[in-house]
Amino acid sequence: MPTKEEWKKQLVDNAEQQILNLTDSDKFKNYLNTVAKFHRYSARNIDLIYSQNPEATQIAGFKQWKNDFNRSVNKGEKGIRIAAPMIKKLTPEDQKRLDTTKEKAIVGYRYIPVFDISQTSGEPVLSAKDFVKENLADHKNVTNLYNELKNYLNNNTDIKVSEKRLSELGGAKGYFQPSTSEIVIGGDEPDNALKLKTLYHEYAHSQLHGLTSEFKDRPRAYQETQAEAVAYVAMQNIGVDTSNYSLGYVATWAKDKAVIHSALSEIQQVSNKVIELSDGLTKQLGLQEDPKEPEHDLKKLSAHDLNKSYQGLQQQVQQATSPQQKAQLKNQLNDVHQEISDRTQKQLKAFAEENPEIKQPDPEYDQSLKR
């Protein structure tokens, strides 16, 4: 079995590999192509869109929906008005008057209609939600650990954790406010595993991107990639798989391998800190067995535990992503397999000695079968 330090490093390495695997998928590449087709709107137009339809998520013009996405605007839908620049080709006199050498310039704005995807019908359009499945399912003891972590941060650090209704968070599950060192979590989130993961995410922001933190000036894509990766690692450490949520979330922020690798290379220290904190709290709550020393004396395990260990290692080998990790797990699996085989041979030999009247297989016949 890996040591604690090896286990922590393995968790982070595995997280990076899983995210890279996702960004290599054809589905994710198609998603990026889709994102590129949508225009990036100015802050002014974003305000205009929000004021007319706060639920809008993906916006395009009437013709663009048809030509780029094979979708049609539903009959009777009212367009969302945004400001579009009017561009004029400049005459030499215009260039002189405006003191510019550019051939074209914006001479004014006009309001044009665009439509949200909810106002259209047609072929499906990939969105971030295709990579972020929010239901993590309720997990036993997750609520207790969430409360214990919240209380620990409030009582033992300068971070203050509070809760608000999700309706007050503008679509977010929680947030970290650097100026006040405050974490706010959506208290009425029905998915307890998602609630705990959100607390880990915001705690990671506090450690990585607070006012005095080393990485506070990283771009938003780096920050979200790092915080969610820490949350993923922390949840994996306690045995809760959040890959349906976390990996997609990270990928839609990072989008390319360079960002993923650079961002994750900086999270090892914080990940270790979160893992140690979680381990201490789960032990206090009686939710975690004391970690066993690396098991080199398999003879001490019961037959039940030995078989359970074999099954668990088989599953880990199938899920392993790095060649080094897979090789290490296979070696452990071989050791357990050898112990099971040795025990079986001893039991068969003992049974044969106790029952001499039972005819034993002919060695020569047995060898002929093997040839």
Image (cartoon, helix red, strand yellow):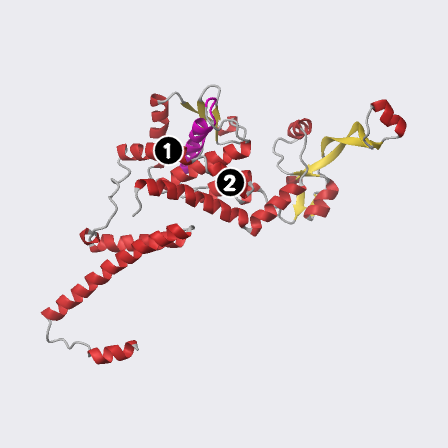
Residue shown at the point (51%, 40%) measured from the top left: 260
Task: Give coordinates of residue 99: x percent, y percent.
Answer: 82, 24
Instruction: List x then y, in percent, for residue 110.
Output: 78, 29
Magenta segment includes 55: no
Q: Residue at x 18, y 51 (%)?
A: 300
What is the crowding at mark 1: few (fewer than 14 residues within 10 Å), some, or many (at least 20)?
Answer: many
> Looking at the image, can residue 144 be seen?
no
Q: Amino acid at mark 1?
A: Val
Q: Amino acid at mark 2?
A: Ile
Residue labelled with disc 2:
260
Where is residue 292, by image quadrant? top left
Q: Could you say whether the residue bearing mark 1 is in a helix, strand or loop?
A: helix
Cα–Cα gap, marks 1 and 2? 20 Å
What span is colored magenta in the figure?
192-212
In the rendered view, would you say 206 is above or below 338?
above
Q: Name the image quarter holding residue 53.
A: top right
Horizontal relation, residue 194 to residue 275: left or right: right
Q: Would you name the residue on which mark 1 appears?
A: 274
Which residue appears farthest toward the top when viewing the image?
180
The residue located at (33%, 32%) in the rendering is 277
Q: Quadrant of the C terminus?
A: bottom left
Above or below for 194 versus 214: below
Dot 2: element: helix
